[in-house]
Every structure is written in structure tokens, then in C-alpha cells.
Image (spheres, coloured by chain):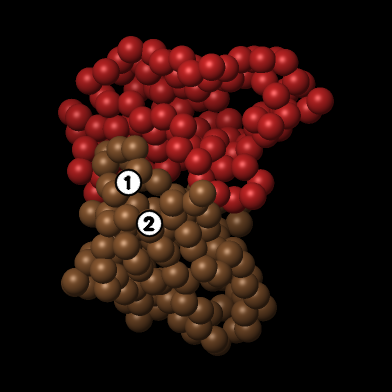
């Protein structure tokens, strides 16, 4: 069975601080996809990144970076120099490569205070 | 401009009534999905909307309660039937394929916020 765990329910930081959101997953599949989505207060789900299981390279996109560690089944997300606009709920998700079984974590609510 | 649109964006409904939510995509897509997000919770897949055939429902969701249509490759509807306050949620459609960047990624519509009194 596929499972995604986001142990941090809520995180609060002050603007310009760095923050890491944790994601741990379980799967029996040898190939799979991992995702991060952002859900701002308006409610829409915004796609941030997809990572294939065979690609363990870390990725950086502006202030965002992702650390994929297959050995620990983790796919953590770091925001550098956080901003108030980063305040949202962030979801980590896991799917098979056919996208037939996508599972979301419980989400982490990030609040960035000015 | 929005690639995936949903109507209505929000609604307040009375217990026992039904609401149909529409999801429109600006290009043909291979797969469409419907999710429910209860207040303060994560997303749960309701069903995969199959073009030209019955939807495939996840455990805990049934066609009588959540009938789904998908008449073509750009449009789908989800009906929430005989509503109760427990149905108060955000309902989101998502798609694979089409004009969006990747066919391996689900992209989501803006959601429909439903409140049942």
C-alpha cells in the first residue's frame, strides 16, 4: 500500500527564515513519482514539482529546493528566505507511474509572519 | 488565464438537495479525476472519470451518491446527491495530459467550496 506521511502539521516562521517541510513515503513499487503541491488560502492546488524515483538528484528552483533520499524514503522541501506569500498548506504526494493511485499526505500548514 | 475551470466556485445548499459541479478543460485530456477535501483535511480521490464509460470509484464512494459524467475529452461533471452537512468540502477536479506541461502530472482546477446546511 502507498502511504505519505507529513509529520509536521503546522509550522510558523518569521519572514526571511529558512524552513524545511518533511515528507516520508512508503511504497512497494520500484518506480514511482513524488510531488509537492501548494494550496494557498484561496484553495486551488498549485503544482510545484514532480520527481521520478530513478532520479535522486536534488533540485533547486529559486528559493525552493527539494532533497530526495531514496535510502530514507524521504522527499523534503526547503524554502529559503521565506516570504509572507509562502504561507499556505503544502502537500506531498506519491503515485505509481500510471498515475492510477495518487496518495496525498495530510499536509503541512506553513505560516510566515512578517 | 485558467486552463481548468470549475463551476460553481462555491455554493451553499440545503440538506437533501443535489449539486452538480462542472469541470472544463481548454484542451483534450486523457484522464480526469475528482477529489474531495474535507475541512482541514487532505485530498481523497473519489473517482476517475472515464470518457465514454462509467467512472471508476474508490473504496467508500458509490455512484448513487456521486454520479459522474464525462461526455467528451474536455468536460466532466460530479453530482453530490442527497447532501448532508458531512458533504461540506472542497471538490476538485484534476487532469492528466492536454495542453498542460506534463502528462505524468495531475493539474488541479480551482475547486468548488460546498457548504451544506
B32 and B46: which one is in front? B32
Query: Please, what secondary structure does the residue beneath circle 2 have?
Result: loop
Is B13 left, or right, of B103 in this rendering? right
Do badges 2 and 1 share one subunit?
A: yes
In the rendered image, what is the letter of the chain coloured brown?
B
Q: Position of residue B45 (x, y in %)?
A: 38, 56
Residue at image position (36%, 30%) is A50
| Quadrant into which the C terminus of chain B falls | bottom right
Chain A in the picture: what colour?
red
Give the farthest residue toward the right.
A114
Q: In the shown orientation, is residue B63 left or right of residue A86? A: left
Camera-side residue: A13 or B101? Answer: B101
Instruction: Say which chain tag 1 marks.
Output: B
Residue B83 point in image, percent of width and height: 53, 80
**On screen, A82 above or below A48?**
above
Q: Nearer the viewer, residue B61 or A18?
A: A18
**Residue B5 versus residue B14 in the image, above or below:** above
Image height of B26 relative to B63, above or below: above
Dot 2 falls on which chain?
A: B
Direction from residue A52 to residue B15 in the image, left or right: right
Q: Are marks 2 and 1 in contact (CB under 8 Å)?
A: yes
Any mark on residue B26, and which?
2
Q: CA distance from mark 2 to mark 1?
A: 8 Å
Quadrant of res A14: top right
**Residue that extends furthest to the top in the rendered view of this protein:** A57
The residue labelled by disc 1 is B99
Q: Position of residue A83 (x, y in %)?
A: 70, 24
Amino acid at each position: 500500500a502507498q502511504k505519505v506521511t507529513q509529520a509536521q502539521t503546522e509550522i510558523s516562521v518569521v519572514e526571511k527564515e529558512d524552513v524545511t517541510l518533511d515528507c516520508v513515503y512508503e511504497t512497494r513499487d520500484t518506480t514511482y513519482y513524488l510531488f509537492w503541491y501548494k494550496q494557498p488560502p484561496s484553495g486551488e492546488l498549485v503544482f510545484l514539482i514532480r520527481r521520478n524515483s530513478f532520479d535522486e538528484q536534488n533540485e533547486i528552483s529559486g528559493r525552493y529546493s527539494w532533497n530526495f533520499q531514496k535510502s530514507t524514503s524521504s522527499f523534503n522541501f526547503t524554502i529559503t528566505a521565506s516570504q509572507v506569500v509562502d504561507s499556505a498548506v503544502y502537500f506531498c504526494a506519491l503515485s505509481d507511474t500510471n498515475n492510477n493511485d495518487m496518495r496525498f499526505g495530510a499536509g503541512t500548514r506553513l505560516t510566515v509572519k512578517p | 488565464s485558467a486552463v481548468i475551470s470549475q463551476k460553481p466556485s462555491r455554493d451553499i445548499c440545503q440538506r437533501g438537495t443535489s449539486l452538480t459541479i462542472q469541470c472544463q478543460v481548454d484542451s483534450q485530456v486523457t484522464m480526469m479525476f475528482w477529489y474531495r477535501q474535507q475541512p482541514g483535511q487532505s485530498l481523497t480521490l473519489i473517482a476517475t472519470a472515464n470518457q465514454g464509460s462509467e467512472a471508476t470509484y474508490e473504496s467508500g464512494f458509490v455512484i448513487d451518491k456521486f454520479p459522474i459524467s464525462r461526455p467528451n475529452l474536455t468536460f466532466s461533471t460530479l453530482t453530490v446527491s442527497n447532501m448532508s452537512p458531512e458533504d461540506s468540502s472542497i471538490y476538485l477536479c484534476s487532469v492528466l495530459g492536454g495542453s498542460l506541461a506534463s502528462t505524468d502530472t495531475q493539474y488541479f482546477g480551482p475547486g468548488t467550496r460546498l457548504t451544506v446546511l
